[in-house]
Structures are given as structure tokens and as C-alpha cells.
Amino acid sequence: MKTVFFASAAAAALIAAPAFAQDTAGSVGVSYQYSDTDIGAVKGIEQDTFAIDGVVATPIFGDWTVTGAAATTYSDGDAFAKGETTLSGSAALTKVIGTYRVGGFYAAEEFQGSTLNTFGAVAQKYFDKATVTGTASYGSVYDADIWSVKADVAYYATDALRLNAGVGYSNNEDAIGYDADIVELNVGAEYQFAASPYSVFAGYTYADSDDLAVEANAIKVGVRYNFGGNLQARDRAGAGLGL
């Protein structure tokens, strides 16, 4: 809990940075997600999740950038006796090298009374109308080891329209040798209104694990307030790492 609090507080403090750093970019958003999960013979476990999140990227020296993110989520549904609120936060240090951005990150998230701590590397390749992002990470909680790799492609159809598709794989293994693989696929779109800092977004995520006998579908919609330019400029300033 303390780890998550300090990570979230640091990211929240960075969100105030636009008043101080001219090249700062980022966003603050609110969202709603509906998910439907099957676990073995148990079908149709529904969950509603509401979230407030923020991300900010600030250049610190030369081609180096600090990116901070924080989120608070409230979840309720069939799997909860009562609603549950969780906090999460991340911090990344990256460097631009030509048309690439590379660096490392740390993330912390509340997880069933403990904290999931994750360390990883992130890399981006910038094209004229697209950004390719890849991450590799290691996380630990309750003596379980979680190894993950993710890839995402964002295509900027116009300055106001961002489309993306991604894939992720993770392996979870606990101290007694329990081993599970999880595959995740997602697609999304975001549209920024003309001459406005506001955008709306929607996304769909599918997750599957044969080892856990789990299959899940989720739909997410929301609105963001953006600063630091259009959607492509925001992402390329370091605020689109997807951590």
C-alpha cells in the first residue's frame, strides 16, 4: 500500500507540471469498463469498473524524459461482496535516439491486500503516421513471479483520430510451482474534437488462459483532457508508453 501511495503521489505531482514545463504533454481521463468473464463452468461473471487516471511526460535534460502515471479505480460486480477501490502508479525514464525512444520503468499496483511491484523496459519506434511500442517486464506479488511482454501499434489516421491494436503474453508462476500462461488482445480508437483539448476513446480487450480455464471480454469507454499538442504529439512526447 505504501509503495502504491508514493508512486501515485509522485505521478499526481507531475500532473501539475504543465504550469512549469513548456514541453510537457499528457492527459487526465475518466472511464467506464464492463467485463464479462468465464471461469471453468462458471459463466457470465460481470464487473463494472470506473477509473480516473492521469499521465504526464516532462523533458528533464537533453533527450531524456520522465513519464509519470497514476490511476484510481472502483470495481463492483459478481466477484465482489462489496465495491473495491485500488490505486496504481508508474514512473519511467526514457531517452530519444533518432526515431526511437528507449528506457526503463517501475510500476506499483494494489493487489488483494498486497502490492504488485513491476520492473521493465520499454521501446518505441516512430514512423510518419504510426508508433510501435514494446514492453518487457517482471513483477512479483505474494511470492508469485509474473513475466510479461506486450506490443502495440498506434496508427494516426488524422491529427484527431488514433487507432491501435495490441497483443500481450504473460507467464505467472508461484512459489509451489503453479504455472499459468495468459494471452491478451486489444483494439481501440480515440478521437480529439477540433480546436479542443478533449477527446473520447473506446476499446475492446479479450483475455484467455487455458491453464486457468479463464476467458474474458471487456469494453471500455471514456473521455480525456489532453495537453501538449494533438494525440500524436502527446504520445511522442513520452506520454503514450502505455504503462
Image: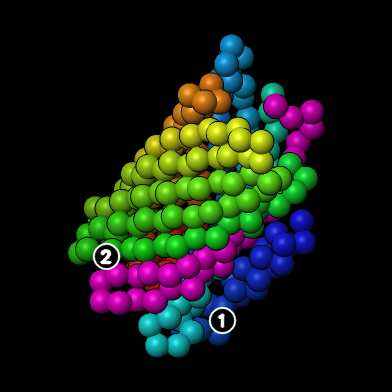
Residue 241: quarter of image: bottom left
Does residue 24 appear in the picture of this structure?
no
Q: Of residues 106 and 237, which is closer to you in this image? A: 106
Q: Of residues 55 and 160, which is closer to you in this image? A: 55
Residue at image location 33% in from the left, 44% down from the top: 165
Residue at image location 48% in from the left, 24% down from the top: 210
Residue span colored magenta: 79-107
Residue at image location 58% in from the left, 56% down from the top: 118
Marks 1 and 2 in Cβ contact (< 8 Å)? no
Callout 1 secondary element: helix
Residue ranking furthest to the top: 41
Residue type at tag 1: Ala
Does residue 107 appear in the picture of this structure?
yes
Which quadrant, please, contains the N terminus?
bottom right
Where residue 102 sits in the image (x, y, percent)?
Answer: 38, 69
Residue annotated with mark 1: 19
- Disc 1 crowd, CA 10 A, few/some/many (<14, 14-19, 20+): few
Callout 2 secondary element: strand
Residue at image location 73% in from the left, 42% down from the top: 112
Residue 50: quarter of image: top right
Residue annotated with mark 2: 126
In the rendered image, residue 204 lying in the magenta stretch gets the answer no
